[in-house]
Each structure stands twice: as structure tokens, then as C-alpha cells.
Amino acid sequence: MSSIQFSECAKACIECSLTCTTCADLCLGEPDLEMMRECIKRCIECSELCAVCAKADQRESIFRQEVCALCTKVCEYCAEECRRHEADHCQQCADACIQCATACRKMVS
């Protein structure tokens, strides 16, 4: 039986999706929730799009390049906000977003 292989793009997208979900959840527990509002919104949006991108890449969708291009933008958008916060989970999320954006950019080129 052969094993299923995942592209680097799909792996980075899934990792980013899960990291963004975790970041949003942990942001909800921060003392100044109002300050974290934008971070939470961006993380949720990024998580959702990264999951779509991983699936599109894995099944070699005819729209995969377009989805990857959009995913790159959304990941960079999310990373920009997460970098503004000192929390470790925000910094880890920003790192995952940058790694995902890099992998998606390679897929598009």
C-alpha cells in the first residue's frame, strides 16, 4: 500500500491554519481583549483560507495558483498584525504565516 504524500505548500498551510486557530483562541484569553480584536479577526480569516489552500493544492485544483496567491497575501496580512503583539503565541503565529506565505509563493512561481 502506498502512503499519501503532501506537498510542502499543503503542509505549511495546515500548520499555519492550526497555529492561527490556536493564536485566535489564546488571544481571547488576553487581559485587553479590545487590543486583540484585529489579531483575532485576521487569524480566523487566515486559518480558514489556509485550510482551503491546502485542500486545493492537495487535489491539484485548477484554481490552486489563484488560491495560493491569495493565501500568500492573507498570511502576510495576518503576520503583520501578530508581530504587533508581544505574546509568544502571536509571534509563533507570525512565524507560521511567513513560512506559509513563502511556501505558497513558491507554488505560484
Image (cartoon, rainbow, N blue to C red):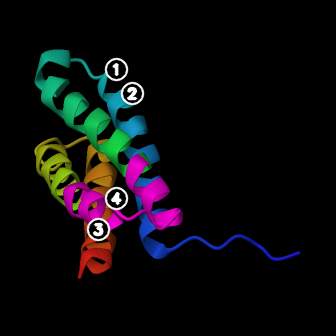
Q: Is residue 45 magenta?
A: no
Q: Label 3: which residue? A: 65
At x 41%, y 48%, the residue is 52
Q: Position of residue 67 (x, y in %)?
A: 29, 57
Q: Label 1: which residue? A: 29
Above or below, 6 relative to 71: below
Mark in the foreground, 3 or 1: 3
Q: Which mark is residue 59?
A: none
Q: Residues within 10 Å of mark 1 (few under 14, many from 20)?
A: few
Q: Residues within 10 Å of mark 2 (few under 14, many from 20)?
A: some
Q: Label 4: which residue? A: 96
At mark 3, the secondary structure is: helix
Of the numbered discs 3 and 1, the one sitting upstream in the chain is 1
At x 31%, y 46%, the residue is 88
The region drawn magenta spans: 52-71
Q: Residues within 10 Å of mark 3 (few under 14, many from 20)?
A: some
Of the numbered discs 4 and 2, the one sitting upstream in the chain is 2
Q: Main secondary structure of the magenta part?
A: helix
Mark in the foreground, 4 or 3: 3
Q: Quadrant of residue 103 in the image?
A: bottom left
Q: CA distance from mark 4 to mark 3?
A: 20 Å
Taking depth in this image into account, of 34 and 40 the one nearest to the observer is 40
Q: Is residue 55 magenta?
A: yes
At mark 1, the secondary structure is: loop
Of the numbered discs 4 and 3, the one sitting upstream in the chain is 3
Q: Amino acid at mark 1?
A: Gly
Q: Quadrant of residue 21 in the image?
A: top left
At x 23%, y 82%, the residue is 109
Q: Label 2: which residue? A: 25
